[in-house]
Each structure stands twice: as structure tokens, then as C-alpha cells.
Image: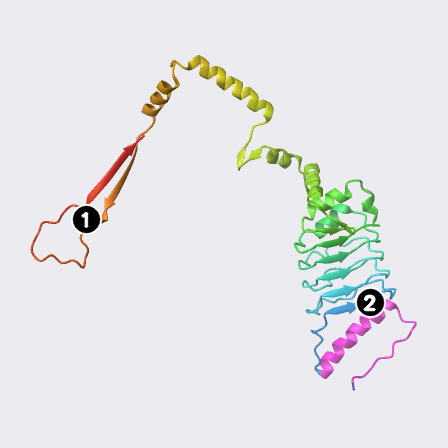
């Protein structure tokens, strides 16, 4: 049997959780039992004030640490392959340096915490290319009137923000607010080339018509087309008639002069 450890009810909750993890570590080395198959960790409503180091559990994919008293996450304590992380209803004031390496994270719940710096929080989540569901409401920085647009613009992979679906119209609106110069260039592009505005196009068209009427010395349009055709450059294409070329397998019965290959040349303007 695996020896059990009696935990005193007066022990600190955080110390109790750390002691359980260390007990697993001792059991693994004493009884040669591997806990790498653990994929779920649930520790909600335990009055925790700190997060234990869970990075050694390489197969861990789902972590519930919500409804505790966690104030700060010290460094990368989660494995990089984590898929879902639930940290809502805590007292977390900053996540800088703790979640940046979680590139496979798809669901992150951080609502009802004490996060006050919007730029630092979003910068920490910037590398999460797989993040689809994110909850940040009931944090101090959500009082910013441009909080929604800024988050949508900086995190393009998020599809559900604060329990609300992110539409394409929201992304376009956020792009116009936080990238006005790029939006101006984008509005002037058509078919991969810079397009003129309506006012400028009208002015240029009027100028072109006046210039043609003043400079055109021909009475008939056919004369103008013929003149332009004569001024255009000559193009030439040459095609070799391979049927007149003797193959290597065809041996002549007697000595004959080789016939030159026929070349067809086409010229046009």
C-alpha cells in the first residue's frame, strides 16, 4: 500500500496543496509510479494564496484555480501545453511573466480579479495564437471606454470575449481606431494597386479630356489609331519546325547533306 499523510485541518491551504504535490513527488520516486498521465488539476474554493509549480506535469491540460485568494503568479508555473486555465474570482493584480509561454492555450478565465493595467495584460497574452475564449470583465481596466476595441485589435485570435461573440464588424471598427494610417492606405487600395479618391479621379478625368482635345491634330479617330500603331514597337516571335530536324535514331542510308532546320518568324506591332 502507498503510505498516506494525515493533513491537519489548521494547516495553511497553500502549504497543504504544496505538501500534496511534494507527497506525489516522493511517492513517484519511492514506488516508481509516474504521474505524467495527469491531465486535469482541480483546486477551487481552497482559500489558496499562491500557485504551486505545476510545470513538471507535462500532460496537464486543464487547471481550475478559481474562487481562491491568489494575488500573484510567480513565474511560469504552468506547462506550455496547457489548453484551459480557470483563474476567475481571485485577487490577481498582475500576470506579467506568468502566462506568456502558454502558446497552446485556448480558454482563459481571468474575470473578477484586480488587474488594472490593460496594456501589460494584453501584451502577456499577445503570443497566444490559439486563444479563442477570454473573459476579463469585472477587472479595473474594463472601465476604460476603449477596452473592448483595444483587446479585439491586439488579440485577433479571440472569438469570444467577455461572453460576447467578436464579429468581423467589431474587428474592422477596432482596426480603424488603433491603426488609422493603415486604414487610410487600405481604403486607397484596389486590386493590389493604389486607387484614387473620387474627387481626384474627377479632376484628372477633366484634365485628360481637355488635354486630348487641345493636342489631337487628327479629325478622324482612325487616323489617330493608325498613327499610334505605327509608333508602337515591333514584336517578333520565332518558332523552330522540329519536324524538319532528323532524329538521332534515324541513320541515313547514304551520305547526304544535312538539311537546315526551318524557322518561322512572325513580326507584328
Percent across and percent down for residue 73 are 78, 59
Mark 1: give few (<14), some (14-19) or many (20+) Cα within 10 Å.
few
- Mark carried by residue 114: none
Percent across and percent down for residue 243 are 21, 49
Percent across and percent down for residue 200 are 57, 23
Q: Residue furthest bottom?
A: 1
Residue with the mark numbered 2: 43
Q: Which element type, helix, strand or loop, lies under badge 1?
A: helix
> Is 184 situated left or right of 45 in this image?
left
Which badge, 1 or 2, is on the more N-terminal residue? 2
Q: Is residue 3 magenta?
A: yes
**Image position of 227 with respect to 39: above or below:** above
What secondary structure is the magenta-colored segment mainly? helix
Frontmost of labels 1 and 2 is: 1
Camera-nearest residue between 149 and 20: 149
Residue with the mark numbered 1: 244
Q: Which element type, helix, strand or loop, lies under badge 2?
A: loop
Amino acid at each position: 500500500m502507498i503510505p498516506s499523510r494525515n493533513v491537519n485541518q489548521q494547516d495553511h491551504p497553500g502549504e497543504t496543496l504544496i505538501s500534496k504535490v511534494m507527497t506525489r513527488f516522493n511517492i513517484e520516486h519511492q514506488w516508481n509510479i509516474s504521474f505524467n498521465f495527469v491531465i486535469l488539476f482541480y483546486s477551487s474554493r481552497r482559500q489558496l494564496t499562491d500557485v504551486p509549480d505545476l510545470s513538471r506535469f507535462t500532460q496537464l491540460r486543464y487547471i481550475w484555480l478559481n474562487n481562491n485568494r491568489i494575488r500573484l503568479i510567480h513565474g511560469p508555473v504552468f506547462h506550455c501545453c496547457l489548453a484551459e486555465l480557470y483563474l476567475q474570482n481571485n485577487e490577481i493584480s498582475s500576470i506579467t511573466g506568468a502566462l506568456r509561454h502558454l502558446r497552446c492555450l485556448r480558454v482563459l478565465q481571468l474575470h473578477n480579479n484586480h488587474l488594472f493595467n490593460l496594456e501589460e495584460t494584453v501584451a502577456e497574452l499577445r503570443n497566444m495564437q490559439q486563444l479563442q475564449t477570454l473573459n476579463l470583465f469585472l477587472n479595473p481596466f474594463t472601465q476604460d471606454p476603449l477596452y473592448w476595441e483595444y483587446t479585439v485589435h491586439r488579440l485577433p485570435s479571440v472569438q469570444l470575449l467577455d461572453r460576447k461573440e467578436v464579429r468581423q464588424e467589431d474587428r474592422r471598427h477596432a482596426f480603424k481606431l488603433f491603426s488609422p494610417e493603415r486604414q487610410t492606405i487600405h481604403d486607397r487600395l484596389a486590386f493590389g494597386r493604389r486607387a484614387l479618391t473620387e474627387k481626384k479621379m474627377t479632376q484628372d478625368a477633366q484634365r485628360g479630356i481637355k488635354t486630348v482635345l487641345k493636342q489631337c491634330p487628327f479629325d478622324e479617330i482612325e487616323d489617330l489609331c493608325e498613327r499610334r500603331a505605327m509608333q508602337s514597337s515591333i514584336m517578333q516571335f520565332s518558332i523552330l519546325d522540329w519536324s524538319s530536324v532528323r532524329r538521332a535514331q534515324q541513320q541515313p542510308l547514304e551520305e547526304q547533306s544535312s538539311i537546315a532546320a526551318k524557322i518561322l518568324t512572325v513580326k507584328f506591332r
